[in-house]
C-alpha cells in the first residue's frame, strides 16, 4: 500500500525518447554531421570520446586557461603600460636574441607582509562562516518542513524558495537598502509598532551584510538539504521509534546524520561564494569593512595593480580548494553508501 | 493419562482452550484512510507463543493491521489490547512490541553492531551490557563475524538476519514481521523459514507475520488469518484452511482448486448430494453442511485429491470423464489439465511415485477422473 507512489510511469518517457531518436537519426543524414564524423574518425575520435571531451573542453576554455592567465599575471611585476604588468617571458639583448624569464614572487610576499590582506582574509572567512551557520539554522528547518509537507504542496513551496532568482541579484540587494536604511521600511515599521522611538542604524553595519548574505544564499542551502531530506526513507524513523526512540532523539540519531551530505553541500554552496562576496558588503556593509572581495576590486580597478590582485585571487582559490576537496570526498562517500 | 494428552493439546492449541487468556485482543477494529476502508471491523485473538500469519493479497489490509499493532497507525474505531493493556494512544516507542520491516529499515550510517544495539542504547543500558547482548544476539543469528560491517556491505539474507537480531534484542513479548522473507531468493527463503520457526520456539516470543505468500504462511504459522478487502474471512490452522476453506475466496487463495457451481439435491445430517451442471454426475459429500437447501453452492476439490484412471470407476457418483489437454512434468509431480464434456477444464496433480508410469497417460487421451467422498468441500460464494 505504501508503494503506490513508487511506480514508474514509462509511457511518456518512451514517447519522448522515441522522438529524440527520430531527430538523431535525421541528424545523422545531414552532410555536416557525416563530414565531421568522417573527419573525427580519421583522427581516431569516436562519438563517445567526443561526448566525453565536451565538458573537458568547456573546463579547459573557461576555467583552466583563465586560471593559467591569472596565475601568470600573479607572478609578474607591475609597470605603467597596457596591460599594466611585465610579460613573464621577454626577449632582451640588442637584437632580441636572448630570452629572459621575469618571475616575481614578490606579490605573494607582499600579501604575507602587509597585514591588510591577512585581516581581510580572516574577516571574510569569519563573515562567511557566521552567515553560513545562520543560513543553515534557518535553511534546515525550512527544507525539513518542505520535505515533510504533502506531495501536493512540495512543488509550490520549493517554487517559492527559488522564486527570488527570477529577479536580478543586484536589484534584490538594492531593495535591502530600502528596507534597512534609517527611514526605510523596517525602521518605520518598528517605530509605528512602538518597539523603538528613533531609527536604529542598520544599513552599513555588519548586521546588514549578514542579512544580505543569508537572504541571498538561503536557496542554495535549502535546495541540497531538501533533495537529501526528501529522499530519506521514512521507515528508518519508524524503525527507530519501534526500538524505543522518541521523535526528537530519532531526529538527532537518524535524520541529522543521514542528512550530513546535504548539510555539507549546502554549507559549501553558501560558504565558498560568501568568502569572495563583493556586492553585498560594498552595498550594505560599513565603508571600511575589510572583505577580500572588496580588496580584490580595489587592487584591480583603483590601484591598477593587476599582479597583486591576481595573487589575491590565486591565494583565495587555493584557500577554498581545501573545503571543495572535502566536499567532493563527502559526496563520494555518500555515493558509495548509496550503492546499497 | 487422557487428561494430560488433552492438557498438552491445550498448550499447543490455546485457541481451543476456553480457559486460555489471549495475549493480543483485537476488538472490532476499523481503519479508514479518507474514504478507503483499509481494515473493516476486525476482531481477532492471538495467544502467547503463537506464530500467527496474516495472509492476503496486496491491499487487503494486513499491513495496516500490523502497523496498528506496532502503533504506527491508530484504529479509527475499536480497540487493541496487548497483554490486557489497552493500546489506544500509546506511541510505538512505549509499546512492548518490536517489528521487523519489509525493507528491513537498517540504519545505513551505522554498523551491524550499532544497528542491533540501537534499542538497548535507547533504553539507556550500560555500554558493556549492550556489547554483551549484541554479541550474543549476533551469534544467535550467526552474524558474529559481520559486526563491524555497514548494511550496504551485506547480502539480502545477511541484512534480514541483522534486522531480526535488531528486533529481538529488546526481548519483546511480541514480534511483528512484515513480509520477513519477501526479499530473499527461493532456496534461502526455505532455509530461513525453518530457522525462523526454530528461533520462535527457542525464545518463546509471540510472532505475528504478514505475508502474501501462502506457502510461507503454511510453513511458518501455527494459525493463519486470511484477509480480504479489510476483513478477516477465515482463521484456522494451515491444515484447516487448506482442507476446510469456508468460502470460494479462501479455497482459491490457498493452493489451487477446482470449483463447480451447484445446488443441493439431498441434505442429510451425515452426507449431502449436490448437482453440478458442469459435471455429468452428482457429487456425494460424506459430511453434513450448514446451508439452506437449494441455495447456490460451490464444490471445491483440490487437484491432488482427484485420481486419473483409464478404467471406468464403479458407482454413479463422484467421477467424470475428460480429455487430457496439457501435461506439465514438474519432477516430483505432474500437472494434468483435463477438458470435460461441459467445457470446464480441471487441474489434476499426480505424484511421480514411479519412474515408469504403467498407465502412461498422454495428450488427447480420454481418462476417467474420480475422487473419494471425503475429498470435496462445499463452500459459499
Image (spheres, coloured by chain):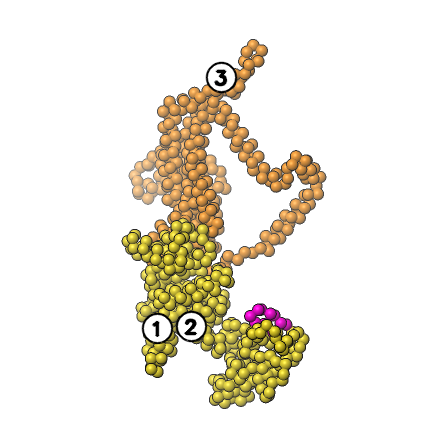
* Gap between marks 3 and 2 measured at Cα: 95 Å
The reply to the same-chain question for discs 1 and 3 is no
Going by the image, does B159 lie left or right of B371?
left
The residue at 47%/22% (across/down) is A75
Colour given to chain B in the rendered image? yellow
From the viewer's side, name the closer residue of A245 and B374: B374
Q: Residues within 10 Å of mark 3 (few under 14, many from 20)?
A: few
Question: Residue A235: x and y, percent?
Answer: 42, 57
The residue at 48%/17% (across/down) is A79
Chain at numbered mark 1: B
Mark 3 lies on residue: A80
The reply to the same-chain question for discs 1 and 2 is yes
Please give the range of residues in magenta. Answer: B326-336
The residue at 48%/61% (across/down) is B188
Q: Which chain is orange?
A: A
Q: Is residue B80 visible?
A: no
From the viewer's side, name the closer residue of B62 and A132: B62
The reply to the same-chain question for discs 3 and 2 is no
**Element marked by disc 3:** loop
Q: Which mark is residue B22?
A: 1
Instruction: Note whether B22 is above or below B267 in the view shown.
Output: above
Going by the image, does B369 lie left or right of A267?
right
**Element marked by disc 1:** loop
Mark 2 lies on residue: B223
Q: Residues within 10 Å of mark 1 (few under 14, many from 20)?
A: some
Instruction: Note whether A237 is above or below B60 in the view shown.
Output: above
* Gap between marks 1 and 2 measured at Cα: 14 Å
Question: Residue A25: x and y, percent?
Answer: 68, 46
Amino acid at each position: 500500500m505504501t508503494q503506490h507512489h513508487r511506480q514508474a510511469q514509462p509511457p511518456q518517457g518512451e514517447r519522448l525518447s522515441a522522438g529524440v531518436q527520430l531527430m538523431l537519426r535525421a541528424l545523422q543524414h545531414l552532410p555536416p554531421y557525416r563530414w565531421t564524423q568522417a573527419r573525427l574518425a580519421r583522427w581516431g575520435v569516436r562519438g563517445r570520446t567526443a561526448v566525453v571531451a565536451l565538458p573537458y573542453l568547456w573546463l579547459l576554455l573557461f576555467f583552466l586557461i583563465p586560471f593559467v592567465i591569472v596565475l601568470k599575471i600573479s607572478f609578474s611585476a607591475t609597470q605603467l603600460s597596457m596591460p599594466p604588468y611585465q610579460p613573464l617571458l621577454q626577449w632582451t639583448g640588442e637584437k632580441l636574441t636572448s630570452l629572459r624569464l621575469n618571475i616575481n614572487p614578490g606579490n605573494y610576499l607582499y600579501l604575507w607582509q602587509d597585514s591588510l590582506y591577512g585581516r581581510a582574509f580572516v574577516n571574510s572567512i569569519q563573515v562567511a562562516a557566521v552567515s553560513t551557520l545562520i543560513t543553515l539554522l534557518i535553511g534546515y528547518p525550512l527544507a525539513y518542513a518542505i520535505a515533510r509537507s504533502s506531495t501536493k504542496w512540495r512543488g509550490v513551496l520549493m517554487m517559492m524558495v527559488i522564486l527570488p532568482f527570477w529577479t536580478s541579484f543586484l536589484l534584490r540587494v538594492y531593495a535591502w537598502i530600502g528596507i534597512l536604511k534609517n527611514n526605510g521600511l523596517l525602521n518605520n515599521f518598528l517605530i509605528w509598532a512602538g518597539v523603538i522611538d528613533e531609527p536604529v542604524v542598520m544599513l552599513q553595519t555588519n548586521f546588514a551584510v549578514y542579512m544580505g548574505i543569508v537572504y541571498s544564499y538561503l536557496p542554495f542551502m535549502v535546495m541540497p538539504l531538501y533533495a537529501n531530506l526528501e529522499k530519506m526513507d521514512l521507515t528508518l524513523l519508524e524503525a527507530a521509534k519501534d526500538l524505543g526512540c522518541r521523535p526528537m532523539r530519532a531526529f538527532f540519531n537518524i535524520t541529522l546524520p543521514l542528512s550530513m551530505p546535504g548539510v555539507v553541500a549546502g554549507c559549501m554552496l553558501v560558504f565558498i561564494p560568501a568568502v569572495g562576496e563583493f556586492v553585498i558588503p560594498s552595498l550594505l556593509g560599513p565603508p571600511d569593512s575589510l572583505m577580500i572581495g572588496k580588496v580584490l576590486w580595489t587592487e584591480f580597478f583603483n590601484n591598477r595593480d593587476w599582479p597583486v590582485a591576481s595573487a589575491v585571487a590565486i591565494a583565495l582559490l587555493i584557500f577554498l580548494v581545501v573545503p571543495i576537496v572535502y566536499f567532493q570526498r563527502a559526496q563520494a562517500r555518500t555515493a558509495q553508501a548509496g550503492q546499497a | 493419562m487422557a487428561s494430560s494428552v488433552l492438557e498438552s493439546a491445550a498448550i499447543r492449541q490455546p485457541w481451543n482452550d476456553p480457559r486460555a487468556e489471549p495475549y493480543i485482543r483485537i476488538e472490532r477494529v476499523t481503519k479508514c484512510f479518507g474514504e478507503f476502508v483499509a481494515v473493516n471491523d476486525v476482531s481477532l485473538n492471538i495467544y502467547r507463543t503463537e506464530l500467527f500469519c496474516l495472509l492476503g493479497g496486496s491491499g487487503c489490509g494486513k499491513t495496516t493491521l500490523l502497523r496498528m499493532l506496532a502503533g504506527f497507525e491508530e484504529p479509527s474505531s475499536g480497540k487493541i489490547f496487548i497483554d490486557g493493556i489497552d493500546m489506544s494512544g500509546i506511541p510505538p516507542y512505549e509499546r512492548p512490541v518490536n517489528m521487523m520491516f519489509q525493507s528491513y529499515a537498517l540504519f545505513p550510517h551505522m554498523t551491524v553492531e550499532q544497528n542491533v544495539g540501537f534499542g538497548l542504547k535507547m533504553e539507556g543500558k550500560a555500554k558493556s551490557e549492550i556489547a554483551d547482548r549484541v554479541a550474543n544476539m549476533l551469534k544467535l543469528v550467526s552474524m558474529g563475524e559481520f559486526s563491524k560491517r555497514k548494511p550496504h556491505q551485506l547480502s539480502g539474507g545477511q541484512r534480514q538476519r541483522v534486522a531480526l537480531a535488531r528486533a529481538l534484542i529488546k526481548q519483546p513479548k511480541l514480534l511483528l514481521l512484515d513480509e520477513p522473507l519477501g526479499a530473499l531468493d527461493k532456496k534461502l527463503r526455505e532455509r530461513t523459514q525453518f530457522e525462523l520457526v526454530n528461533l520462535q520456539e527457542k525464545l518463546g516470543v509471540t510472532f505475528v507475520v504478514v505475508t502474501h505468500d501462502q506457502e510461507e504462511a503454511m510453513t511458518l504459522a501455527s494459525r493463519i488469518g486470511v484477509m480480504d478487502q479489510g476483513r478477516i474471512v477465515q482463521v484456522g490452522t494451515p491444515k484447516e484452511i487448506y482442507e476446510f476453506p469456508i468460502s470460494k475466496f479462501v479455497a482459491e487463495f490457498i493452493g489451487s482448486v477446482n470449483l463447480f457451481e451447484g445446488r443441493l439435491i439431498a441434505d442429510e445430517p451425515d452426507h449431502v448430494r449436490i448437482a453440478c451442471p458442469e459435471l455429468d454426475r452428482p457429487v456425494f459429500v460424506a459430511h453434513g453442511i450448514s446451508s439452506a437447501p437449494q441455495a447456490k453452492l460451490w464444490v471445491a476439490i483440490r487437484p491432488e485429491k482427484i485420481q486419473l484412471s483409464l478404467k471406468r470407476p464403479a458407482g454413479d457418483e463422484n467421477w467424470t470423464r475428460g480429455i487430457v489437454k496439457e501435461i506439465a512434468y514438474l519432477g516430483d509431480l505432474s500437472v494434468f489439465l483435463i477438458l470435460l464434456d461441459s467445457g470446464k477444464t480441471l487441474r489434476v496433480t499426480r505424484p511421480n511415485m514411479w519412474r515408469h508410469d504403467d498407465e502412461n497417460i498422454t495428450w488427447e487421451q480420454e481418462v476417467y477422473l474420480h475422487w473419494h467422498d471425503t475429498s470435496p468441500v462445499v463452500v459459499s460464494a
